[in-house]
Amino acid sequence: MKTSPIMMLFYVGLGTVFGLVLSRSGAADYNYIQGMFLLEEFQLYGIIGTAVAVTAPGLYLLKRYGKTVTGAPIQFERKPGHRGNVFGGLLFGAGWSITGMCPGPILVNIGEGKLYAIAALAGTLVGAGAFGVLYPKLQGILRLPPLQVGTGEG
């Protein structure tokens, strides 16, 4: 299914609003993020908790009453847990703590003119590339499931 230019503009608009919310709430601010990891600032815990409290009922309603464009019920596939979840979580958390940014706030920080965020973006891209190259080797060592390639359906 091809995305229309109007939908693309809608998506860019949603992304812009999301970036603005991240910026204005402090969720993209290095000092707030470091304070959160050092248990000195609790603002981001409130933001994350609010996001969960708002999203959970919405996901429940989508799962219960939602339909796709074709009218089929929306289904959420449960992903199996494995060792890769632990290693990936540790790497993600370490990178987030060191740089003070996860992928969304990297772009917000670049948009705010913070040049150090370009280094975080470069690290993210190098890490994603390394993951793609190293996954077949790590798969056997860590007993990881096969990598699913592609964007999936829809």
Image: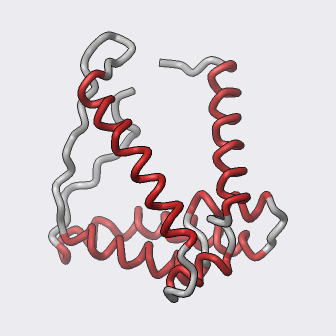
Q: Quadrant of residue 134?
A: bottom left
Residue drawn at point x = 67 percent, y = 77 percent: 30
Residue 154 on image: x %, y %? 39, 27
Residue drawn at point x = 24 percent, y = 27 percent: 64
Q: Is residue 27 left or right of residue 154?
A: right
Q: Please state which of residues 59 and 145 is positioned toward the viewer in this rendering.
A: 59
Q: Please state which of residues 43 and 3 is positioned toward the viewer in this rendering.
A: 43
Q: Is residue 135 above or below residue 54?
A: below
- Which residue occupies the extreme right position in the image? 113
Q: Is residue 61 left or right of residue 9?
A: left
Residue 76 on image: x %, y %? 25, 37
Residue 99 on image: x %, y %? 61, 79
Q: Quadrant of residue 86?
A: bottom left
Q: Is residue 49 above or below residue 14?
A: below
Residue drawn at point x = 28 percent, y = 36 percent: 60
Q: How many dots with numbers?
A: 0
What scheme was used to colour the molecule?
A: secondary structure
Q: Please state which of residues 23 and 109 is positioned toward the viewer in this rendering.
A: 23
Q: Is residue 13 left or right of residue 141?
A: right
Residue 26 on image: x %, y %? 67, 66
Q: Please state which of residues 25 and 113 is positioned toward the viewer in this rendering.
A: 25
Residue drawn at point x = 50 percent, y = 83 percent: 37
